[in-house]
Amino acid sequence: MNNQSCIEIGNEWGIVSARQAGRELSKNIGFGSVDQARITTAISELARNIYLYTEIGQIELTSVVKDNDGREGIKVVARDKGPGIENLRDVMVDGFTTSGGLGAGLPGVKRLMDEFDIESMPGEGTTITTVKWLR
Amino acid sequence: MKSVVLQHLKDNKSLYIEEWRKSLEQHEFTKQGSTFSSKDMQQEMKDEFISVVFQSIELSSEENRDAVHRFANRLIYNGWAFSEFIRSLQALRRVVLHNVSANFTKEEFVDVSVEFEDWLDEQITRLAEEFSKIQNEVMTMQKTAMKELSAPLIPVFDKISVMPIVGTIDTKRAAQIMENLLEGIIEHRAQVVLIDITGVPVVDTMVAHHIIKASEAVRLVGAECLLVGIRPEIAQTIVNLGIDLDAFTTKSTLKKGIEAALELTNRTIETSEQMQSNGGLKR
Ligand SMILES: Nc1ncnc2c1ncn2[C@@H]1O[C@H](COP(=O)(O)OP(=O)(O)OP(=O)(O)O)[C@@H](O)[C@H]1O
Ligand SMILES: [Mg+2]
C-alpha cells in the first residue's frame, strides 16, 4: 500500500488530484464514507487556499499510527511559501475572508478533522497540519 | 543533405535494421493503463517504428514530419507508452556507434559520430514534439467534451426545470452553470429550478458559495431554487463546514424535489384511481 504522497498545487487540477489521492488513502486506511467525505473536503479547502493565495505549495498525505493506543489515521499537511498569514486568530473566525469567499474554509477544516495546527510567518509561508483518526 | 553518416546508414540499411531489431528484443513496449499488449502487437509496433525512422533518411524534412505525426497519432490513440520509443532510439545509438567505429578511421569517426548524434537528436526531438502536440490536441478535445457535458437545464413540467450537475466544479464550469441556469429559466419560463448535486463528488466552500450565488441570481429573475440530491455524507460535511443552507429548500432526492416543486406551483401528481375517488376532475 502506498501510504505517503505529495501533490503539487499549482493550478485547479492539482486540487482535484490531491482530493483523489486523499480519498484513495483514507479508503485504504479504512475510513467510512462520511469520514472519507470529511477528509476529502478538508483537503479541498487547504489545496484551494494554496491555489488562491500563493504561487505554489503542496499537500502531503501520510498514514499515521497514534502513539498511545495504536489507532490509525491520516495526516494532511498543507505547505506553502506564500505571503503567510498576519493574524492567525482572524482567519479562524467563521466568515473571515479576504477574497469574497464564504470564509468558512479554515474553521471548517478544523471541525472536519480531529487535530489542527497552523504555523505561519508573514513573508515566509504557511504550514497547516491536520490529522483524522479512525474511530 | 549528403551527409556521410546518412549515406552510410542508407547503404547498410538492412544490416542496421536487423541489428536494431535484435537489440529491441528485450524492450517491453507497454500500453498505458497496462492493457495487455501481445508480443505480436509489440513486434508490429517496433517494426513500424523502425521503418518510420529509416524512411526519414530519404524523406524531406516536411514529409518526415508528416510521417512522424501520423505515427505519433497512432501511438496516442492506441495508448502506447511514449518513453519506450525514446529508449529505442537510444538503443539505435549504441548499435550505430558500435558499427561506425569499425567502418571509419579514427579521424573520420569524430565527425561521423557528431553528425550521427545530431541526426538522432533531431529524430528524438521530432517524435517528442509531435507526441506532445497531439496530446495537447486530445486535451483540448476533452475539455470541449466536458463543456458539452456540463449542466443543461431540462424542463420537466410546465414551469419546472431540473439542472443535474455531474462532476467536479472548477471556476470555469461554475460560470458556465450560472449562465445556463439564467438563460434556461428565461427560455423555459421556469418558476422553480431543481439543482441536483447527486453527481458532485465534493461539496466544499467554493461549490457551496457558487450554489448560493446561483440561487440568489435565480431569485432575482423571479424564480426559486430547490437543492436536491444531497447525499448523507455531504450533508454532514456541509454542517461541519458551518455553511448555512437555511435559505434553501433542500430535498434529499430529485423525486421529493419535484413533488415540492409541483406543490409550489399549486399542482400535485395523482394516480387515475385517486382521481376517480376524488370525483373526477379537480380544479
Ligand atoms: N495558505 C494561505 N496563505 C495565505 N493566506 C491564507 C492561506 N490560507 C488562507 N489564507 C487567508 O485566510 C483567509 C481565510 O481562509 P478561509 O479558507 O477560511 O476562507 P476563504 O478562503 O476566504 O473562503 P472559503 O474558504 O470559505 O471559500 C483567506 O481569505 C486568506 O486571506
Ligand atoms: Mg478557503
Image: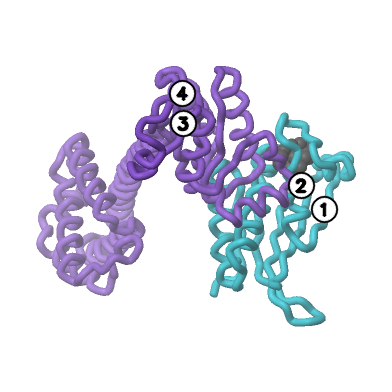
Chain colours: A cyan, B purple
| Residue marked by disc 4 | B190
**Residue A83 visible in rendering:** no
State the residue in front, A99 or B210: B210
Q: Which residue is drawn at 28% across and 70% down?
A: B27
Q: Do labels 1 and 4 touch, CB within 8 Å?
A: no
Instruction: Please report, as a chain letter, where disc 2 is located.
Output: A
CA gap between label 3 and label 4 equals 15 Å
Is B21 on the left-hand or right-hand side of B165? left
**Residue B25: image location, x then y, percent:** 23, 72
Question: Which residue bears the numbered disc 2?
Answer: A106
Closer to the observer: label 1 or label 2? 2
For marks 2 and 3, give the CA distance. 44 Å
**Residue B161 location (% of width, % of height):** 44, 30
Badge nearest the viewer, 2 or 3: 3
Q: Tell me how far mark 1 sits from mark 4, CA to CA.
A: 47 Å
Residue receiving disc 3: B267
Element type at mark 1: strand
Residue type at mark 1? Ile
Mark 2 CB near ligand 1 (8 Å cut)? yes
Q: Which amino acid does label 2 sit on?
A: Leu
Q: What element carries label 4?
A: loop
Q: Which mark is residue A118?
A: 1
State which mark lies toward you, 3 or 4: 3
**Residues under labels 1 and 2: Cα distance?**
10 Å
Return the disc, 1 or 2, that comes first in the chain's sequence. 2
Q: How many numbered tags mark residues here? A: 4
A112 displayed left or right of A9 = right
